Image (cartoon, grey):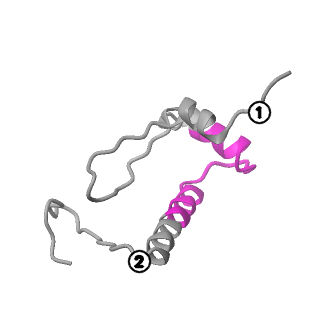
């Protein structure tokens, strides 16, 4: 009898996570299989059910994720800081 795998087990096989700093959080996730065109096309076909891979579709997913993380931080009253390109992240005035 096969035991169902947990979400953690599945993610451990497909997603690499790394913690860079303990006093702030930023998300740098990557899925190795999506680093190649064939992997992205396969993801769009199989998981999203869309026939034509589109950058716009993937941008919508990224925008949705970003909005969800911002909502999460707002609900927990967490400080959110947006940095401009090239700005040092070691110190900032909040």
Q: Nearer the viewer, residue 34 or 68?
A: 68
Residue at mark 2: 77
Magenta segment's dominant SS is helix
Query: In which image quadrant can residue 24 be found?
Result: bottom left
Residue 32 placed where, x, y %?
48, 33
Left or right: where does residue 38 sit relative to residue 66? right
SS state under label 1: loop
Q: Relative to 37, does residue 83 appear above or below in the rendering?
A: below
Left or right: where does residue 84 sit relative to residue 40? left
Residue 73 placed where, x, y %?
44, 71
Mark 2 surroundings within 10 Å by alpha-carbon count, few (fewer than 14), some (14 through 19), many (20 or more): few
Residue at mark 1: 4
Q: Is residue 14 magenta?
A: no
Which quadrant: the C terminus? bottom left
Residue pictured at 50% horizontal, 33% vertical: 36
Residue pictured at 50% horizontal, 74% vertical: 71
Residue 82 placed where, x, y %?
29, 71
Residue pictured at 33% horizontal, 74% vertical: 79
Q: Which residues are magenta?
A: 40-65
């Amino acid at each position: 009898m096969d035991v169902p795998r947990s979400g953690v087990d599945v993610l451990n096989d497909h997603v690499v996570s790394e913690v860079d700093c303990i006093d702030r959080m930023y998300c740098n996730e990557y899925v190795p299989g999506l680093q190649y065109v064939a992997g992205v096309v396969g993801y769009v076909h199989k998981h999203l059910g869309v026939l034509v891979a589109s950058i716009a579709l993937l941008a919508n997913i990224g925008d949705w994720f970003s909005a969800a993380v911002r909502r999460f931080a707002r609900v927990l009253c967490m400080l959110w800081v947006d940095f401009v390109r090239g700005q040092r992240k070691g110190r900032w005035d909040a």
